Image (cartoon, rainbow, N blue to C red):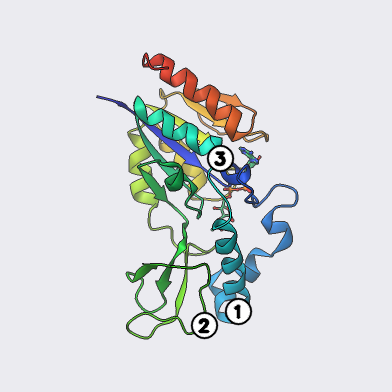
Amino acid sequence: MKKQVIVLSGAGISAESGISTFRDSGGLWEQHRIEDVATFEAWERNRKLVQEFYNLRRKQLHEVAPNAGHKELVRLEQAYNVQIITQNVDDLHERAGSTHVLHLHGELKKARSTVNPDYVVELEGWELKEGDVCPQGGQLRPHIVWFGEAVPMIEPAAELCAKADVCIVVGTSLNVYPAAGLVSYVPRHAPKYVVDPGEVQAQVPNVTYIREKASTGLKKVVDELLKKENFS
Ligand code: OAD
């Protein structure tokens, strides 16, 4: 049976595709205040601004493509069961070809009803507008987990982490909880790799740090893991 690799990914893996991260210098949270665009209170106070913020992110997503880092994780699937758990709301892992992707913080290309949280639809274009409603007449909102909201996928994600044989953490500053706590569910003995050009520290045993961008750093990790299973 193939071993299980869990990949915990964040904004940094999409940086080389041209999508800004949040907390690096020049990142999104330097240009926008979280409380203005990424909370339910912001949505109630200034819906237009929130819609505009996510419409722009969605428009940009239609203009970019997966990069070498995303593709390395697809290459790993020949020898391992690879489960990606991403904080990203883009769909670049799926477009690269990864088959198991769990989104912790929602998905940009989807919208959700404000009166029925089970009503989630895929958007056709990039724009979500005032007056776009569900069949019950409720306004559609971005399908994003905002600050202060529950993270419904955290339990299944923690269960997956507990079954990991290997874990790769890539492109996340590990600042946002509960996502940042997932790595501590990975068994102690499982080898862990942190791929990030920044000074990210994972407070768990058995970690190798690769202080590089996702494209080159993941290539090294994937080469090593494939070699271990006699693939190349
Ligand atoms: P951050 O912006 O906090 O962290 C991005 C990480 O990517 C940093 O550690 C960078 O050093 C690293 N990085 C930059 N360029 C990279 C590259 N080319 N290759 C690899 N790594 C690179 O982003 P996240 O940790 O994903 O949530 O942020 C977590 C959550 O905070 C997001 O999901 C979002 C945000 O607020 C919501 O909006 C709900």
Q: What residue would you read off at disc 1?
A: 48
Q: Which mark is residue 67?
A: 3
Q: Position of residue 106 (x, y in %)?
A: 45, 58
Sequence-first tag of 1 and 2: 1
Mark 3 residue element: loop
Q: Position of residue 227 (x, y in %)?
A: 43, 15
Q: Secondary structure at mark 1?
A: helix
> Is tag 3's residue or tag 1's residue first in the polypeptide sequence?
1
Indicate the quadrant containing the C terminus: top left, top right, bottom left or bottom right: top left
In percent of width and height, residue 95 lies at 45, 47
Q: Nearer the viewer, residue 152 or 97?
A: 97
Nearest to the observer: residue 73 or residue 164: 73
Q: Residue at x 70, y 52 (%)?
A: 27
Which quadrant, please, contains the N terminus?
A: top left
Give the label on residue 130, or none: 2
Measure how far apart labels 3 and 1 are at the Cα level.
32 Å
Assess whether mark 2 and mark 1 are in contact (beta carbons under 8 angstroms): yes
Instruction: Note whether ligand 1 is within 8 Å of mark 2.
Output: no
* Residue found at x 38% / y 17%: 231
**Please, what is the three-letter code of the amino acid marked with disc 1?**
Lys
